[in-house]
Amino acid sequence: MTAYQREPDTGVGIVQRQHMTWAAPLQLEGGGSLAHVTLAYETYGCLNASASNAILLLHGLSGDAHAAGHHSPADRKPGWWDAMVGPGRAFDTDRYFVICSNVIGGCQGSTGPASRDPGAGGPARPYGSHFPVITIGDMVRAQARLIDALGIGRLLAVAGGSMGGFQALEWATALPQRVRGAILLATSARSATQTIAWNSIGRQAIMRDPHWRGGDYYSHEPPADGLALARMIGHITYLSDVSLDARFGRRLQASADPAFTLGPEFAIESYLDYQGDIFTARFDANSYLYITKAMDYWDLSDRYGSLDAAMARARADFLLLSFDSDWLYPSSESAAIATSLRRAGRRAEHVDLHSDAGHDAFLVDLADQELIVTAFLAQL
């Protein structure tokens, strides 16, 4: 079972996005359900005869199913975790069957606000404002359907950073019998008040854009300005003061002297404008709203009464990687999870890595991660 064409020295090479759809409704934690749920996914490597070598990768807010490889020779950029996935890499596709799916609520092939609403009646139209609020748990239950359909009873490991770490923790605590190992990077067992605040500002930027139209903008001009601003706000939280200063400082973009205008002059302003603009070309504003709201609801301690009670449900071995410049999900969050797991008698290795990259370190500073993840997987 494979969905890639191996090419020498190019990782997993050319990959193909696949889709799976279920007619049975997916019941949602907030009430109601989603009918005809579709998940977009990609796979790399081959499932072994005992179906015991499967690893599920779980993406963050702006990610998708495209974790590795290229969709065509013309693709300029590979998947979001390409350097970690492939022959001889941390997620070694000569040994493991690696899966990644786009979460429900997303906009890269899985059922989300831009998808056709089967309950609308009459001409096909997108869900828009009628899309239900979802949770991290809902995302994982949809993924479990995919894992079932692929004939996998128990995953060798789940792995993800940021919101992907939320999903990995959900797998390990809600479906403990189905996970042998869990790799958590730059994440937390709950969304802190500050995280909710940043997400709320981003959502307000979108919803106050007059083109949002209450979420029903699909036959009109989209709220691109609001989405770009939301991305600019969010992007700052992924970086560190050290990395921003080293890369941009107070450098002016176009001249050596200030122009004394209200327009953008500093290099950091141009960079954020660029990040906002390219994001609107590939992401849906409503998906941003629904996914960040799902992140805000994330709180394992509240669901089970305490962090210890939540971690006592787990049966997996854990690897937690944090980064000393990450102020969005600081190292103390990973340390708390690891301590709670050890109290529950679980094997939990926590490594706090040095990086100037901030929260984005789990996506860009990969050398140390690759060695640690490789060793952890070899012990499962």
Image (cartoon, helix red, strand yellow):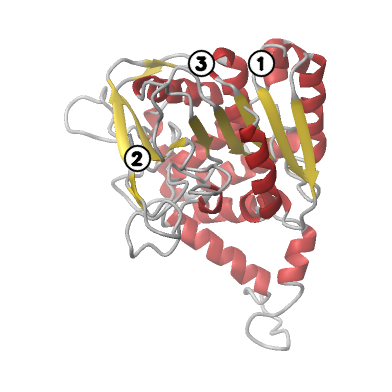
- Closer to us: 246 or 369: 369
Counting residues from the start of the chain, the first of labels 3 and 2 encountered is 3
Residue that label 2 marks: 109
Which quadrant of the structure image shows residue 274? bottom right
Let me know if residue 52 appears in the view: yes
Look at the numbered disc 2 and give the secondary structure of its residue: loop
The amino acid type, in three-letter code, at marker 3 is Glu
**Quadrant location of the C terminus?**
top right
Give percent across and percent down for residue 3: 33, 42
Counting residues from the start of the chain, the first of labels 1 and 2 encountered is 2
Q: CA distance from mark 3 to mark 2?
A: 22 Å
Residue that label 1 marks: 314
Kindly identify which numbered label has been placed on residue 29.
3
Establish if 339 lies above or below 327.
Answer: above
The amino acid type, in three-letter code, at marker 1 is Ala
The mark lying in front, picked from 3 and 1, is 1
**Quadrant location of the N terminus?**
top left
Which residue is located at x 65 percent, y 15 percent? 315
Kindly identify which numbered label has been placed on residue 133.
none
- Closer to us: 295 or 313: 313
The amino acid type, in three-letter code, at marker 2 is Gly
Which quadrant of the structure image shows residue 239? bottom right
Query: Please, which residue is most extreme toward the bottom here?
Result: 256
Please rate how many residues cluster around mark 1, counting C-alpha atoms within 10 Å: few if below 14, some from 14 to 19, many from 20.
many
Q: CA distance from mark 3 to mark 1?
A: 21 Å
Give percent across and percent down for residue 222: 39, 51
Q: Are marks 3 and 2 in contact (CB under 8 Å)?
A: no
